[in-house]
Image (cartoon, rainbow, N blue to C red):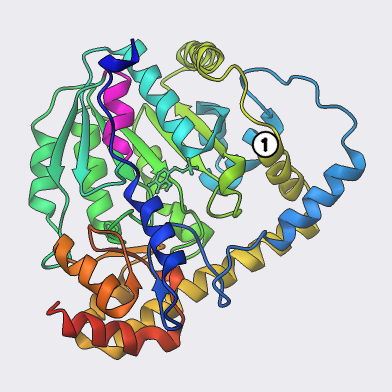
Amino acid sequence: MFDELNSRPADSLLALIKAFQADDRPGKIDLGVGVYRDAMGRTPVMRAVKAAEQYLLETQDSKKYLGPEGDMQFVSLLQPIIFGKSPTFTQRLVGIQTPGGSGALRLGAELIQAANPSAKVLLGTPSWPNHAPIFSSARLPVKEYAFVDLASQQVTFESVIDALSSNREGDVVLLHGCCHNPSGIDFTMEQWRRITELLVAHRLVPFIDLAYQGLGDGLEQDAAPTRMVLDAVDEALIAYSCDKNFGLYRERVGALYVMARNGDDLRKAESNMASLARVNWSMPPDHGAAIVRTILESTEMMAMWRAELEEMCQRVNGNRAALAAASPDLAFISRQRGLFSNLSMSKDTAVALRTSHGIYMADSGRMNLAGMQPADAGAIVAALRAEGC
Ligand code: PMP
């Protein structure tokens, strides 16, 4: 039967990792794959994570099954970090642990499909390349609209307003909560206010993807747009990832939260989330969520985590400032947030940056700001100039 399959293209970022490793030029710079890197170019296990693993090693006395909802203490201890301390949110939300933010998006997509099979998903482009396929494979039609113009590095807010004004009640709007991937361009609070008004007026359901909380302007500021939207709408979904802000990538740590109109709806959503989890992965992997729970249960480990996350955030923003200082043409980079910015360039230019200058970024022009040192800014600017961008 397998001869009926069409081959699929390999992940181009993985090919980029291999090409970077094979390059023996000493000045090569890796702005490719989307993970945080420290000043030594490493993606370290965070100090609080090491401490929590040590604690778990010594104290965990069973690995028996937990159930499709995973570690519910993890799910509830994350809530104040994401949603603040407002009791209104706590009463109106249910959550479930998922394998990463990707699992949360997939589960949310299937929940929407089960609840309202005629819902469309509105997706601003460019976006994380996995968004559209996740929704489509859950049989939800995806309607894309231009969110940002890379040539001018500006939000095309008119097209956002148009998209949100011309759709049916119950349609879903995917929104990046902070640190937009790939552009680094987030809405201003004023734009979020307008978006919130449109969501309410047109009875659209926000699905907020929060995968980088703490890596933009800090934990509280990065959550502010999400909290503002949730304050105004009746129903929402939030896909959360701990894989970047706890550096747990391969452990696959995330959660899906749903806000509903009343307790009955919440209970229905909750039971559907559990049964959808059951048919997808039965139960989420435990170790990463147990680490996060352990950190959030301990004042000391929590303080370590917050301090290291703050260092990571400052390092990325320091690199942004260094690039902006090296060239007025890149001033916009210091106004963007998160791991990524997306320069406007052709694939040929991205290839030339690799082959002629040893600067590796995605073919789309997306660069990971954590992949450089402030001292690399001059070389990056010179290479961009040499390639005419
Ligand atoms: N959403 C966005 C915007 C992302 O960039 C990513 C990861 N690159 C995810 C979700 C998925 O995160 P995870 O690795 O936790 O599945």
Where residue 127 sits: x, y (%)?
26, 47
Magenta span covers which residues?
130-139
Whether the magenta-drawn stretch holds residue 314 is answered as no
Q: Is residue 77 above or below residue 374?
A: above
Where residue 383 sits: x, y (%)?
25, 83
Where residue 229 sits: x, y (%)?
35, 42
- Quarter of the figure that contains the N terminus: top left
- Which residue lies at the image location 21% right of the left edge and 72% below the top edge? 352
In the visual, does 337 lie left or right of 277? Answer: left
- Which residue lies at the image location 58% right of the left edge and 76% below the top edge? 40
- Which residue lies at the image location 68% right of the left edge and 17% below the top edge? 67
Where residue 119 sits: x, y (%)?
23, 19
Would residue 62 be seen by someone viewing this image from the given angle?
A: yes
- Which residue lies at the image location 11% right of the left edge and 66% below the top edge? 151
Would residue 84 be seen by someone viewing this image from the given angle?
A: no
Seen from the viewer's position, the closer of residues 213 and 225 is: 213
Residue to which mark 1 is pinned: 74
Residue found farthest to the front: 3
